[in-house]
Image: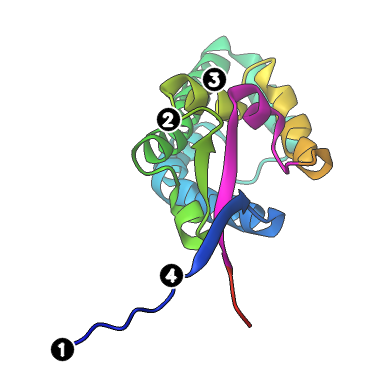
Amino acid sequence: MKRLNLPKEKTFIGPALIWKRIAAFFIDMAVINLVILFPFRSLFRDIMPKDYNFSEAYKILSSSADYTGFLTSVSLVMSILVLLYFWMLERKMGQTIGKMLMRIYVVSSNKDLKAWQLLARNLVFLPVFPFILLWIVDPLFMFFAKTNQRLSEILSRTRVVEVYSLSND
């Protein structure tokens, strides 16, 4: 039996489309909310009254250093787990669950993705100063950079890319 000698599809790697990146991020946030954050909800429910408003919550938190310290510790643990979600998946597969569904992935400007690069690109998930500033600056940078990179991606020398195919149509 003879094999067909068809031409291979021509492809190239380019920057991922912004809408795909945003969709992947929201998918990842849904996964994180379900897997990481949901188990901690009962801890917060036990501390805060059921029908609280902002001023009541502030009074509770400011009345006791124990409450504040506990909430800070739990928030830090949750943030580290979120950071590990991105770090481990991108380290092993080059993509998170959201990126897999959107068919985009992370690459290094160097040859291989290094652990420090993945840590640097995901520090935005730590809720401590100065990383909190990245919550606004980092995603906005993506819309103004020619390469569609976040600030943390430029500093970590990483990019989010996708495979494009050139059709003969």
Does residue 119 lie above or below 93 as drawn?
A: above
State if disc 4 and disc 2 touch (CB < 8 Å).
no
Quadrant containing the N terminus is bottom left
What is the magenta range?
147-165
Q: Is residue 164 magenta?
A: yes
Tell me the distance, in whole angstroms, between the alpha carbons under discs 2 and 3: 35 Å
| Outermost residue, bottom side | 1
**In the image shown, does 69 or 30 lie closer to the viewer?**
30
Of label 1 and label 4, which has the lower sequence position?
1
- Colouring chosen for the image of the structure: rainbow
| Amino acid beneath label 4 | Lys
Please give the label number shown on residue 8: 4
Q: To which residue does mark 1 refer?
A: 1
Of label 2 and label 3, which has the lower sequence position?
3
- Please give the name of the residue rendered at 50% of the width and 53% of the height, measured from the top-left corner: 99
Of label 2 and label 1, which has the lower sequence position?
1
As helix, strand or loop, the secondary structure at mark 1 comes to loop
Query: Splitting the image into 4 quarters, where does residue 122 fall?
Result: top right
| Amino acid beneath label 1 | Met
| Amino acid beneath label 3 | Thr
State if disc 1 and disc 2 touch (CB < 8 Å).
no
- Please give the name of the residue rendered at 44% of the width and 53% of the height, measured from the top-left corner: 97
Q: To which residue does mark 2 refer?
A: 112
Tell me the distance, in whole angstroms, between the alpha carbons under discs 1 and 3: 68 Å
Q: To which residue does mark 3 refer?
A: 72
Residue 26: image location, x then y, percent? 59, 54
| Amino acid beneath label 2 | Asp
